[in-house]
Image (spheres, rainbow, N blue to C red):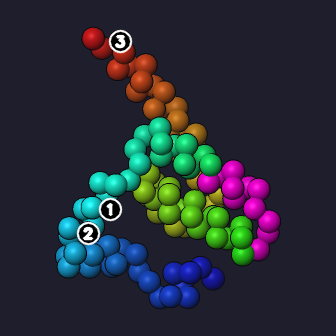
Amino acid sequence: MTWKNILKIDMKEARRLGEKYAPEEMGRSVQTLPRDNEMMSELERRVQSVKSAPPGLQRRSALQLLRDAAERAGMPDAATKSLAEISNFVREMKVRSKGNQSNSGTAA
């Protein structure tokens, strides 16, 4: 059972209501997110913390923090993804960012 089931929270509905009734707060949270390299290093750090966390509540808490960070990084449906799926997403994002950095230098 996930925390969403326990709290009976529908995240899509929560976001919709947040955008409707508190758009300035919703916009502020998007603007303060870390970007690109910082975001990837945060995700990598969180993946390692899940892998090194002892089983039980600590591991579940670390996985939830990882899922939240992955969702902020743009992973669709991150709340339902496994550790392996999020690790693959992080690897793909690193490859893309390296490709974008090399392409941006040659376009001049």
Which residue lies at the image location 76% right of the left edge and 74% below the top edge? Answer: 56
Residue 51 seen anywhere in this rendered image of the structure: yes
Badge nearest the viewer, 3 or 1: 1
Residue 74 seen anywhere in this rendered image of the structure: no
Labels 3 & 1 near each other (Cβ < 8 A)? no
Coordinates of residue 13 in the picture (x, y in percent): 33, 79
Furthest toward the right, the residue is: 54
Coordinates of residue 91 in the picture (x, y in percent): 58, 40
Q: Which residue is mark 1?
A: 29
Q: Which residue is mark 3?
A: 106
- Identify whether 9 is placed above or below 74: below
- The span from disc 2 to disc 1 (Cα, nearest Å) is 6 Å
Which residue lies at the image location 67% right of the left edge and 71% below the top edge? Answer: 60
Locate residue 50 relative to residue 17 in the image: left or right.
right
Q: Which of marks 2 and 3 precedes in the sequence?
A: 2
- Identify whether 77 is placed above or below 18: above
Could you say whether the residue bearing mark 3 is in a helix, strand or loop?
Answer: helix
Locate residue 102 relative to residue 80 in the image: left or right.
left
- The span from disc 3 to disc 2 (Cα, nearest Å) is 39 Å
Q: Which of marks 1 and 3 precedes in the sequence?
A: 1
Could you say whether the residue bearing mark 2 is in a helix, strand or loop?
Answer: helix
Quadrant the N terminus occupies: bottom right
Frontmost residue, 27 versus 10: 27
- Identify whether 93 is placed above or below 58: above
* Neighbours of disc 3 within 10 Å: few (<14), some (14-19), many (20+): few
* Neighbours of disc 2 within 10 Å: few (<14), some (14-19), many (20+): few
The span picked out in magenta is 46-56
* Neighbours of disc 1 within 10 Å: few (<14), some (14-19), many (20+): few
Q: Which residue is mark 2?
A: 25
Please name the amino acid that badge 3 sits on.
Thr
Which residue lies at the image location 64% right of the left edge and 52% below the top edge? Answer: 47
Q: Main secondary structure of the magenta part?
A: helix
